[in-house]
Each structure stands twice: as structure tokens, then as C-alpha cells.
């Protein structure tokens, strides 16, 4: 199956497993791209980021 592009949004509370889910998605992306090895937890910004400023989401969604 050809890879699909898009955005995966993860909204969570602190200490709710966000880093675990990000690591899972990073490893899944590596497997789908045929990359060997595991995702280094210190390089999690390769495929994802985190954001605390609600203004960015408001701008993106067109909401105040």
C-alpha cells in the first residue's frame, strides 16, 4: 500500500502517554520508510513537534 501523507494530531494531558505515542508513531514511520533500527527518544523532533501556544491552533483553525 502506498504511504499516505497528512497530519496526525495528538492532544493530551501531561503524563498521559504522549511521549510513548510519539515514539510509537516515529517507529511506525521508520518501518514504513524501510529504515532500520529504533527511534532515538532524543531525536523525537525529526517527525513531530509539540506546541503549547493555543494561538497557533486558533490561527490554523480560524477560531479565536
Image (cartoon, rainbow, N blue to C red):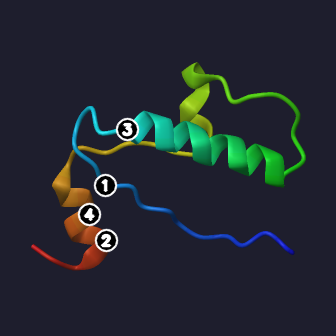
Q: Secondary structure at mark 2?
A: helix
Residue sitting at 22 percent across and 43 percent down?
13
Instruction: Characterize the local packing of mark 3: few (<14), some (14-19) or many (20 or more) Cα atoms within 10 angstroms.
Output: few
* Horizontal arrangement in the rendering, residue 6 relative to residue 50 (left or right): right
Q: Quadrant of residue 54?
A: bottom left
Q: Looking at the rendered structure, which numbered label has been put on residue 60?
A: 2
| Separation of residues labelled 2 and 3 (CA atoms) | 25 Å
| Residue 64 rendering spot, x and y as whole percentages | 9, 73
Query: How far apart are the alpha carbons under marks 1 and 2?
Result: 15 Å
Residue in view at x 60 percent, y 26 percent: 43
Where does the image place residue 58, in percent across and percent down from the top left?
20, 68
Task: Give me the C-alpha separation between circle 1 and circle 4.
Answer: 12 Å
Which residue bears the numbered disc 1?
A: 11
The answer to whether 64 appears left or right of 59 in the picture is left
**Of pointers 1 and 4, the one earlier in the residue sequence:** 1
Residue that carries the numbered disc 3 in the rendered image: 17
* Quadrant where the N terminus is found in the figure: bottom right
Of badges 1 and 3, the one in the foreground is 3
**Place of residue 38 in the rendered image (x, y in percent of width and height, measured from the top left):** 75, 28
Q: What residue would you read off at disc 4?
A: 57
Answer whether labels 2 and 3 touch (C-beta < 8 Å): no
Q: Nearer the viewer, residue 6 or 21?
A: 21
- Using the image, tell me which numbered label, if any, was put on residue 31: none
For residue 30, what is the image quadrant?
A: top right
Pointer 2 and pointer 4: residues touching (CB < 8 Å)?
A: yes
Q: Earlier in the sequence, mark 1 or mark 3?
A: 1
Amino acid at each position: 500500500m502506498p504511504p499516505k501523507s497528512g497530519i496526525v494530531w495528538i492532544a493530551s494531558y501531561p503524563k498521559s502517554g504522549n511521549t510513548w505515542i510519539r515514539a510509537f508513531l516515529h517507529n511506525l514511520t521508520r518501518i514504513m520508510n524501510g529504515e532500520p533500527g529504533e527511534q532515538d527518544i532524543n531525536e523525537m523532533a525529526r517527525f513531530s513537534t509539540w506546541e503549547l501556544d493555543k494561538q497557533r491552533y486558533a490561527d490554523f483553525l480560524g477560531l479565536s
